[in-house]
Image (tube, coloured by chain):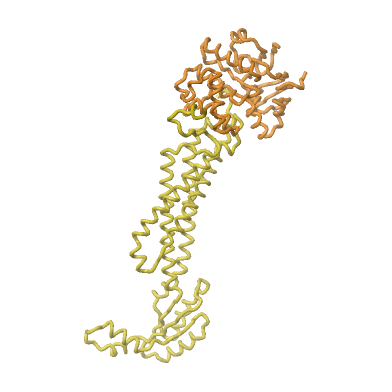
Amino acid sequence: MISDLLPEHMKHLHLPGGFQLPPFGLHQWLALIIVGVGLWLVGSVWLGLQAGQQWVNSWQDDVVVHVYFPHDQELALIRAQERFEKWPSVASVQLRPVEEGVAWLQEWLGDTGLDAEEIAKRLPLVLVLRLGNHDESSEFIFADIRDEAVRQGGFINEDELLLARMHGYVASVKYIVLFVTILLALAMALIISNTLRMMQLSHQEEMALMRLMGAKEWFVRMPFMLEGALIGAGAGFLGGMLLWPISWMVSTISDHFHLSGDVGWISFSLMLLGLVSGCVGAWISTLRGVDDRADEDLDS
Amino acid sequence: MSDATALLSMQQLMLRYKTGKVALSGITMDISENSFVYLTGESGAGKSTLLQMFYGGLRPSSGKLSVQCVNMRTAQEGEIRMLRQRTGIIFQDHRLLFARTVFENIALPLRVQGWHIDKILPRVHKVLSFVGLGDRMWAYPAALSGGEQQRVAIARAIVTKSRVVLADEPTGNLDVETAQQIMDLLKAVNRSGSTVIMATHDLHLINEFPGRVITLHAGAMVADDL
């Protein structure tokens, strides 16, 4: 009986309101692509940050600071060694054996015919400091090491300190990226919101009629909420999928540094972020203006 | 004066806009179930405004208005929504959705009320057959004549078996012959048990299709031809 009433070209009936999606047109696809690319950028930055953190952590577990003394300052070196050994934040203090330096130098010089031992005599004496339980709370340890080294007549490698402080810099970058992510998520929510606003304006009469027929507000707004969620989740999926080629392209470099970015987890997070942005955008779009059209007069 | 069994009851009904302009004042009358009522008067007399008040589009400033046992001054939004589900509305410009088929237009009130598609289809077909458009279910309104479009609007208003049908100048844009067809349909709707309240200033139609005539002038009721 019912199939008799349905024409052949009409397989699916899309009645407005409730749990039905409005037609998915060009504007929605455009919004999905724009938001998808935005989320892909966010994902790429997070992927980079994750790799950076892994790289920093790989050598931050064993932070070593070298303190150099002129080769004729052996007494000062011993004095400094005794003082550093008393520091609780310094796990170990080792005097690098001269033989080690000679062996390394000989290998480096190769068969040039130069005498490594003679050259090694001119190299500075080296104290190797290993830091224990190093974290952001011990931010002054590097300055203290520098001060003590200078006080005893030695010096340190400033570039080495910069690398040792990288953990703190990465943490700061993480906060900046988080802030930018929130800003971009809001921007993406507004893009979705504007797309849905256009849809609502084109369905203005339909929405007004539904209200005149006694529809509840959730019934009128639900299709747009669903559409916002779909655009957001779709964009998140797109952004997540676009991360895989990036990951594949940089795999040679990342393998070299033993870095393994968790693309799957970031893709999943992007989908969630997209979904939330879509829902927020849909909510914003239904907040403005639509209530005012609830009761259009009969003369309109 | 007030009849306890009246479907619509008004006592000293007044509507004043925020601008201070008084749109309706001192309207006292009852409309009983299954009656056919004309609201007539010149343009701006308050016919459309009064119809709007009957479905909660406007709330009274003072006086009493009871529609289908709902006090329109104190009713909650939920009560207004339920009232609207029991009320069919026909507009002068019919307000059909031109991007949707005749079926989708008529199915809209049923969808709002949560009907399943399996029940919507035969119901819409039955109502369309009643208004003589059984074969135009899958057409778009743009492909229909003005009279056919108005018949679709009537079908949309009666598809939920509304107790009250409000019609705001439904024949205003139609020629005499088509207007008579529309009036025949509205009379048939009335005979099937719905109360029809129709705003019009077409005296010929009132003479040809008798009913109770309430005349408004400048927002006040000046005659009630029971």
User: In this rendering, is residue A265 above or below A190?
Assistant: below
Q: Residue at x 52, y 12 (%)?
A: B178
- Colour orange, chain: B
Q: Is residue B31 above or below residue A266?
A: above
Observer able to see residue B93? no
Left or right of B147? Residue B76 is right
For the question of whether residue B111 can be seen, the reply is yes
Residue at the extreme front of the image, as rendered: A1
Residue at x 41%, y 46% (from the top left corner): A34
Residue at left 51%, top 76%? A133
The extreme bottom residue here reads: A75
Quarter containing the C terminus of chain A? top right
Residue A84 in the figure: left or right of residue B73: left
Question: Where's residue B167, x and y in %?
Answer: 60, 20
Residue B163 location (% of width, % of height): 66, 23
Q: Nearer the viewer, residue A218 or A113?
A: A218
Between A124 and B72, the residue placed more toward the observer is B72
Residue at the (59%, 34%) spot, across then down: B114
Q: Is residue A133 above or below residue A180?
A: below
Location of residue A251 by image quarter: bottom left
Q: Position of residue A267 (x, y in %)?
A: 44, 55
Left or right of B143? Residue B165 is right
The yellow-coloured chain is labelled A
Residue A49 location (% of width, % of height)? 43, 62
